[in-house]
Amino acid sequence: MFGYSIGDLGAIFAMQGFAGLILFSVYVLMALGLAIIFGQMGVINMAHGEFMILGAYVTWLTSNAFQQFLPSLFSGYFFIAMILAFIASGSLGMLVEWALIRHLYKRPLDTLLATWGLSLMLQQAYRSVFGAREVGVELPEWMMGSWQATDTIQIPINGMFVMALTFLITIVVAYVLFWSRWGKQVRAVVQNRVMAGAVGINTEKVDCYTFGLGCGIAGIAGSAFTMIGSTSPTAGQLYIVDTFLVVVFGGAASLLGTIASAFTISQAQSTMEFFMSGSMAKVLTLLAIVAILMIRPQGLFALKVRK
Amino acid sequence: MMDNPRFLNRTEALGILALVVLLVVILPLSLDVFRLNLVAKYLTYAFVGIGLVLCWGFGGILSLGQGVFFGLGGYCMAMYLKLEASSVANTRIQSTPGIPDFMDWNQITQLPTFWQPFHSLTFTILAILIVPALFAFLIGTAMFKRRVGGVYFAIITQAVVAILTILIVGQQGYTGGINGITDLRTLKGWDIRPDHAKVVLYFFEVACLFGCIFLAQFVRHSKLGRILVAMRDKEDRVRFSGYSVANFKIFAFTLAAMFAAIGGAMFTLEVGFMSPSFVGIVPSIEMVIYTAVGGRMSIFGAVYGTLLVNFAKTSLSETFPQLWLFGLGALFIAVVLAFPNGLAGIWRDHVQSRIDQLMASRKSKSGAGWTDGSVADGAPAE
């Protein structure tokens, strides 16, 4: 069969499947933040990609700083970078919520336009500060190379690290949203703002922190993203449509749905990429999603809510 | 048609008059051919804007996919012009004479079947109107019949834009890829490139624009237009009153798509090429922004908004390329936060009321006041 032996084919599928898993991790990281902002709060944040890129640039800055001042600790810089990325994107998110979003909760379509304007400004800001060229971070030694699973199957270590990170963050987010006191408040505000306010929840504060959390996770996604790709001022825009589709396809209000849909989309795409050109694989994947959404507009996992 | 009071009230008739004066007299007299051609390029987006006023402003359906229809119209036109430009005589040096140059570069030896009918101008004109309309009808039917609306509709139309752009870029042999369809020369033997042709095309485009404005006015003042507005504000009540909400939405969306397609075809004629960079996600959102700046509820506002934003874009990006994106971004945010009804809203709230007062005291001055004011409105355009 095409000159491949059975073993070769198995190895190709395993590696292709793994490539899909890395794509899946990136999708999940990006979509988690958006699932909170769009799925829970109903705000269309077109600047989500730019929050992600902010995280990526913070990581890049941190790695440079470590290289220059603390070369002995360079192997561990990534964990600090991630925390800094979360703080940077999260606080920018809270600022944006306070200045912009809170005036627009009743007009969801207008948040789209306003955040699009915000994304343009952020892009230009990145371009002015960091330059238009792509930047890439230096990986510490232990993250480079790949793990030889068998003679023919190689799995890159940075990919495994991103996957582990995704797993961890998903669990933390799920815990925060579904089991912590604050998560209950978030869900209460989302379901019924007036009643939540009436029972004593400070809805404005909850909104602000929720938006900040979503943006902060986008920052972590950007941070993780630097390990598998390079960063440029407009890179965020490339992913925003995909990310929205992941969230919508999964069923906007469901975290589990987001994960399932990220898995489906990434695996479909990376499997098809083996058989045809990357652009056709993308077209077919998107077409399939749109077709499924036309048949099932509520997405894969819909919450049953009375309206 | 002027005698129907519902079709055009007096203010709107004066508004049209002001726009006619601006587009037919002032701009052609005051601008050189290069600048006039720029105006013509901007006006192609006004077609999209008028469509968006109908479907977004009145119908409440925000489509982020107007670039698809703009692109379909533009590509239909470009395919016809390209076939005419790649006659056997013009393409002797190719390994397969008689097919467009980019096909030859991509080792295609035969004209693909879907290109064949574009040898005929009649078919092309029909295709410009019908292909996007059919496409919009299909999307609209699939979405609105299942009561998908609002945010979801916006995101799905955006996905459709992404699909079409990737497809055009990916299928280089059939569509010209990222470069688009370039080097267009003649329309039925009439060269579209020299200056006098640009002027003729400009006036033809303005005529088409007024055709679309009249049609939009007609829809707006008909019962259909009022049902659209009712539906936007209280969809369920309209549904319970026995109207088929989905059908009205499909109609508005399809009409908007046709307007966008006419704009796209005009764009190809004016600019002389068509490429995926006018189809993608960013241009589609920019089209929405023009409408938002002009005023999503105002048909004239869409035209002025398009002209103003584009002029600002050209002049600012020529002089301060760094500042331009900051300015544009700030403009969107300002429009959304402070002036949700755009220029038309500012006009109505601050200028119109003064004019009304003036008219009440000095009735004879009303006509002059309007014309002056509207030109001032478009004044930065010069």
Image: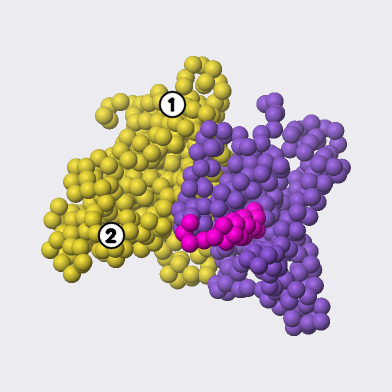
Tell me the CA gap for discs 1 and 2: 43 Å
Task: Give how far across and how far down residue B173 sits, in percent.
Answer: 33, 59
Name the mark on residue B344. none
Residue B27 vs residue B36, the one in the foreground: B36
Residue at position x 51%, y 16% in the image? B241
Name the mark on residue B247. 1
Q: Is residue B118 visible?
A: no
What secondary structure is the stretch in magenta mostly built from? helix
**Mark 2 sits on what residue?**
B108
Question: Eyeballing the image, is B74 above or below A59?
Answer: above
Task: Give how far across and how far down residue B88 sits, in percent.
Answer: 14, 61
Query: Closer to the camera: disc 1 or disc 2?
Result: 2
Going by the numbered disc 2, the residue's amino acid type is Ile
Q: Which residues are magenta?
A: A1-24
Determine which quarter of the picture holds residue B178. bottom left
Residue A248 vs residue B45, the one in the foreground: A248
Q: Does residue A103 appear left or right of residue B105 in this picture?
A: right
Give the colouring mode of the picture.
Answer: by chain
Q: Which SS class for mark 1?
A: helix
The answer for which chain carries disc 1 is B
Determine which quarter of the picture holds residue A256. top right
Magenta-drawn stretch contains B267: no
